[in-house]
Image: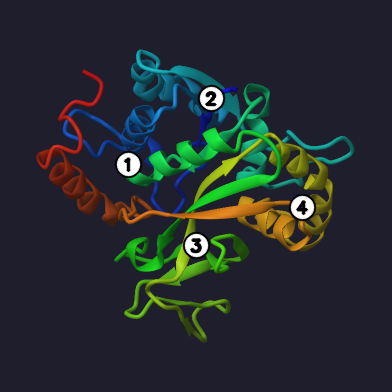
Amino acid sequence: MKKPVLVIMAAGMGSRYGGLKQMDPVGSHGQVILDYSIYDARRAGFETVVFVIKDEIEADFKARVGSRVERRMNVHYAFQRMDSLPEGYAVPEGRVKPWGTAQAALAAQPFLDGPFAIINADDYYGPEAFRVIYGYLSAHPQGNEYAMVAYRLENTVTDFGHVARGVCQVGEDGLLTGIVERTRIEKGPPPRFTEDGGETWTELPGDAMVSMNFWGFTPSLLEQARRRFPDFLDRALAENPMKGEYLLPTLVGQLIQEGEATVRALSSRDKWYGVTYQADKPAVSAAIAEMTAQGLYPDNLWD
């Protein structure tokens, strides 16, 4: 059986954050958030990582992140490019951003021939998440049985603006029955979201389970993503050619509704930390320092 592989999506430029937040240190020895994710993944059992990046950050990324990770894990680099599109499609003039997380997964496909987990580069997920996803993927290496690590909404919001979250519906059997992407959620209290620029708001329970883009898949997901990419592009190019995104939560929701896949919701009690905005960084650094003081991490992860 092939061991699960970790895929890290690091191609996004932090537009709200104001720079390459994936490379902004939060640890005392220059560690970035994804260093802690890789550390947690390695001790959970992962041995190979695929970084999905942009061509223009390759040299800096390898120098500041990849070079030290390569001493501990097998490392591959995949490149998410705007023009990596199905035959017959072209990038609309003026578009500057890639096509979303499902396209990022497709970029990593050449390195994936077994089960894989996929995460964001700029989110801290906690060690429990990596343990449960590695265990699930090891037991379900093939087929259409996927998994997602779900977090309590109140553990995933920021004090300094809004966030996007996939709000989940989970059945009594622990399977995901639906997921709705809410692109503007604010902390409150209580947490709330808007779909009209803030004219009206809808409250959400703090214990609502949400997706943080921590998924466990088999290669069948990639085939589904590739097959459905043209349909997404037809809609996006007609409705939102500059910003339309092919998102994993949306794709997974379609597969669930059509009976093409099941998704096990694996809950994590860990608190999420992230640097959506510049003002988030001090809180993340303080949390990392506290966890280091408690012995959860060594002071210098890769020494």
Q: Which three-letter amino acid code belongs to the residue tagged 4?
A: Glu
Mark 3 vs 4, N-terminal side: 3
Q: CA distance from mark 3 to mark 4?
A: 23 Å
Crowding near pointer 3: few (<14 within 10 Å), some, many (20+)?
many
Q: Which residue is mark 1?
A: 127
Percent of width and height locating residue 128: 34, 45
57, 144: nearer the viewer:
144
Q: Which residue is mark 2?
A: 3
Mark 4 vs 1, N-terminal side: 1
Callout 2 touching callout 4 (CB < 8 Å): no
Q: CA distance from mark 4 to mark 1?
A: 30 Å
Percent of width and height locating residue 15: 47, 50
Mark 3 vs 2, N-terminal side: 2
Mark 3 vs 1, N-terminal side: 1
Query: Which residue extends farthest top?
Result: 71
Q: Which residue is mark 3?
A: 165
Crowding near pointer 2: few (<14 within 10 Å), some, many (20+)?
some
Relative to 127, is 71 above or below? above
Quadrant assignment for the N terminus: top right
Under tag 1, what secondary structure? helix
Relative to 8, is 233 above or below? below
Residue 122 visible to the viewer: no
Percent of width and height locating residue 151: 41, 59
